[in-house]
Structures are given as C-alpha cells and as structure tokens.
Amino acid sequence: MERQITCINCPVGCRLQVTIENGQVTRVEGHGCKRGETYAHQECIAPARMVTAAVPVADRNIPVSVKTRTPIPKEKIFACMKQLAVLSLKAPVYMGDVVLSDVCDTGVDVIATKTVE
Amino acid sequence: MLSNELKQQVQYVDVLVIGAGPAGMAAAIAAREAGVENLLVLEREEHMGGILRQCIHNGFGLHRFKEELTGPEYAQRDIDKVQELGIEVRCGTTVLSVDEHRFVTAISKEKGVQLFEAGAVVLAMGCRERPRGALGTPGSRCAGVYSAGTAQKFVNLEGYMPGKRVVILGSGDIGLIMARRMTLQGAKVLACVEIMPYSGGLNRNIVQCLEDYDIPLLLSHTVVDIEGKDRLSGITIAEVDEKRNPIPGTEQHFDCDTLLLSVGLIPENELTQQAGVELSPATQGAVVDDNLQTSKEGIFACGNVLHVHDLVDFVSAESFRAGKAAAAYVQGKKRQGRFVEMKDGNGVRGVVPQRLMIPEGETEPVQVMFRPAAVYENATVVLTAGGKEIMRQRKRIFTPGEMAELTLKPEAIRQIESDTVTVDILA
C-alpha cells in the first residue's frame, strides 16, 4: 500500500511517500532528514501526539499550561483531555512539576510548562 | 525643545530595546554579550515573553534548541538568560514616542513619564492581528466574533472558553492552532474557511490541528453573512471565484455561536513611523540593511515588527544579529562599503534585507528571507545582479505559508557589481 503523508517534525513539512507491506513500512521517499523517515514509520504504524492544555489552579485566576512529556498514542488524546479536565491543582505549580503521572496508562507524565505561584 | 528641568530627567542608555517578546529578549541578550553594559528593555505588558506566553502548544525551538518546546518554555529560556545577565527590563512600561535622534518617551504606573536618549534603539514591538473591520464582511455586529489570538488568550491565559460551536475564518497558524485548542477543550469546530486556494498556515498545523480532528478546510471560500442579535447565531459562507468574489448559489449556512478570525498579522509600526523610518509596502515593516539597521542610523528592527515570521526560532536568530549590530554601532565599529538594493522579482514578496552592504574588508554570509507569492513546486530561486546570476537554489516546494530563507555566501556577495540584486522564483 502507498500512503502520502506530510511530515510534521518541523515546519518544512516534507511530503513523504510511504510504502507499507504487511503492516511494515518498507520504503520512505521525500524526506529531507532522518526524522522524516522515523516519523513515517511511526505515523503509519503507531501515530502519536504531544497533548498540551490549560488546566485550572484552585484559588488562582490563571490556569497553568501543561504538556505530555512525550507524545502519546493518537487515539488517547481525548481520554487524556478528560483526565486533565477533572484534575484539581493547588498553587504553587512550578514549571516541570508532574501534574498527572502515567496519563491513561501510557506511561507518560503530564508536566507543567509554566509556573503559577 | 525640552525645558532645562526636563533635560535633567533624561536618562542616557547605550542600547534601548522596545519590547520583551522573543525578539526583544534575544536582541538584549546579544547586546549584553557583545559588551553593552548600559542596556534597557521596555515592555508594555506586565510580563516578559510576548505572544509566546499564550502559545501553550508545542513545536517551538526545534532549530535553536534541537528540541520541541511549548511557547512558555521557549520564552522561559530567554527570560532566564536575561535575568542571569542582569539585564534591566521595565515591564508595564509603554513607549509613547521615538524620534529619529533616538529620543524616547515612555510611561508606566510606577514611574510616570520617562525620558531616554539612546545610543541605539532596537525596535522589537511584534505584530498584531488583522481585525474584522479590515475585512468588510457584511452582517450583524453581534458578540461572538473574535480574532483567533484573542480567543487564544481567553482560553490559555485566562481560562475562559469563548464559545461552543465554532467556525474559523482564515487558515493562518493561530486559527489552525485554535481549531485544535477549541476542540480539545470541548467545543465543536465546524469548519475552517479560507478565501485563498491554499492555506496560509504551516503544513504541520494543517495535519495536526485540522486533519487529526476531521475539521474540514474549505479553500476558496469566505464568510458572506454574520447573523445574530446579541450573540452570534449563525454564519453563511460561499465559494469564491479567482477574483475572490462570492459565487451565487454556492452558499452554505452554519449554526454557530463563535466566529474566529485568523486573517493575517500586521507589524506594529506606529513608533517606527514616528521615527521617520522608511517602511516597505511588501512587508509592512521597516526597510533594513543586512545589519537590520533601518533608514535611520542607530535604529534597528527585528522579529515580527520587521516582517511577520512563521517560526520563533528565526525571530530569535534575526534578533541576535540585530542586538549584536546595535552593540557594534554604539561601540563605534563602523562598516565601510557600498550599498546595493535587494528587489522582489517574480514570485517573491518582501525580501529582507532590502539593502545589502558590499563591505570593503571581510565579507560575512547574509541571511535573506522572503515570502513566496504563490505555491511553486520543484522551483528554483535565483539571485541576479546586473544580468549576472550570483546564486541559485532549488527547493521542492515554495508556499506563501512558509517563509523562504537562504544564505548568501561571501563569494556570491563579492560577485555583485551592479546597484541592485533581484530575487526571482523560476518555476
């Protein structure tokens, strides 16, 4: 099977032609760097995304921004957002703090990307 | 003329940077690292970081830090550096005027009016969004129409959702990012409507913000009616022809409570104009040389106030050069040479720098940036000086959504004998 995907590793957005045979990526063309090749394998076999969000902090007027430390499986994005929506955080939250560990059994922690004191 | 009393209040600063977003911070860091002690940064907002503060998504820093950061994390690295270097930053301070002699007035709640005389000024005020009024879209003046960046501020910095059923007009990056943000935070995004036959946003954003969530991107479409009494209740869109006029009979209606506009960014150059700096109609920013110096000596410009970038990494890189050049200027390191004009040719819009110095001594490589006027696949950018080709570079794709960048090498610069260099894209 041939699949055309756009590499998202950097804003160049290389157009990749990916050949998939028996659930395996057998050929990648059109990538400008090695990350594109890695991405083609991942995107066609196990797509993953970083998730970022703004989460309320109790008694503070401003939410704290958070991210998954690494990308999580694409199909778990909404489940992840659901867990974040019911999170109750207390100030202070510091950049880099783990606000939720092992989100949706992905083994990935959600960490704060700013400080709310 | 200033009274004697006022004259005594004037503070002399070697390098004065206006704006503490990514551009201003990078310029200040570079100036300090080049040895400028008497350095001051003025920032209108209460915090450093500029627009990055509300860009909580990831994707920043791949070029500069070789890792993927969110906006607040990217900003924090510069904030930490600014603080480590002991650079004075006055937040909550709005600059009211700059003149060609680099006399600057500013105002803040704490200190009132402040007067400065600067050895060099770096303009780093960033850009702002094109508002609804600039579009001439007909319809009701109801609530529920926001610029995408305003909505981004509400959601990410203040914790409010501006609506539940959303249509996005324009496919600029902020609009695409907000399509995903609104979806993740629980809203339904019905469509992203783009008047041009291509998106103005980055590829990765089209993939990760629209395609991932099955949000349709309707190219060559625009909003033709906005309905609602107090609050927006619906909009009508239509397909447009090559002249961007709506085609009768192609109308579609959407029930929605929110319309987000992502229809372009405009460099914020009111202060630049006051200083009498020449502006470029193509970039809507200052005309600069390869040192980022404007038409007024000692006034430099960098980042989105100079030309709207796609990537903060490139803003930082450009601003480091501006800060370094401003430092060299106040330290009296003058360059000798002759200037040539850089001109937009076929398929090219807004070449920066617009002036290039051919120095007498050692020649440094020069970064040249421009925006392609349309989509060109497998095309070549060619630089010509007086009929002589000095450089060519092939690229698989040029699109208006992605700023093109190339490095003009010293051996190419030394070949220039004419007064102008033209940049063309040859399909």
Image (tube, coloured by chain):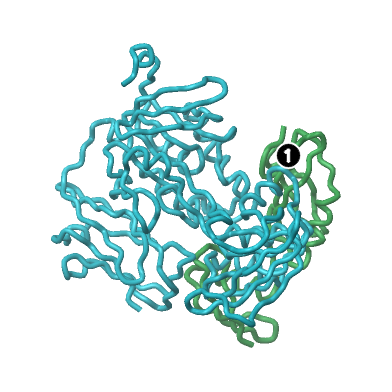
Q: Position of residue B357 (x, y in %)?
A: 22, 50
Residue A68 showing in the rendered view: no
Q: Position of residue A65 (x, y in %)?
A: 70, 46
In the rendered image, which quarter contains the C terminus of chain A? top right
Q: Quadrant of residue B350?
A: bottom left
Residue at (48% x, 22% y) in the render: B113
- Above or below, A14 against A110 in this view is below
Residue at (41% x, 39% y) in the render: B271
- Helix, strand, or loop for circle 1? loop
Q: Quadrant of residue B328?
A: top left
Q: Depth check: B58 or B425 in front?
A: B425
Tell me if mark 1 has few (under 14), some (14-19) or many (20+) residues whose alpha carbon lies within 10 angstroms of its own.
Answer: some
Is residue B130 left or right of B323 when viewed as pictured? right
The residue under label 1 is: A62
Q: Position of residue B219 (x, y in %)?
A: 58, 75
Q: Colour of chain A?
A: green
- Above or below, B289 against B235 in this view is above
**Which chain, by letter, is cyan?**
B
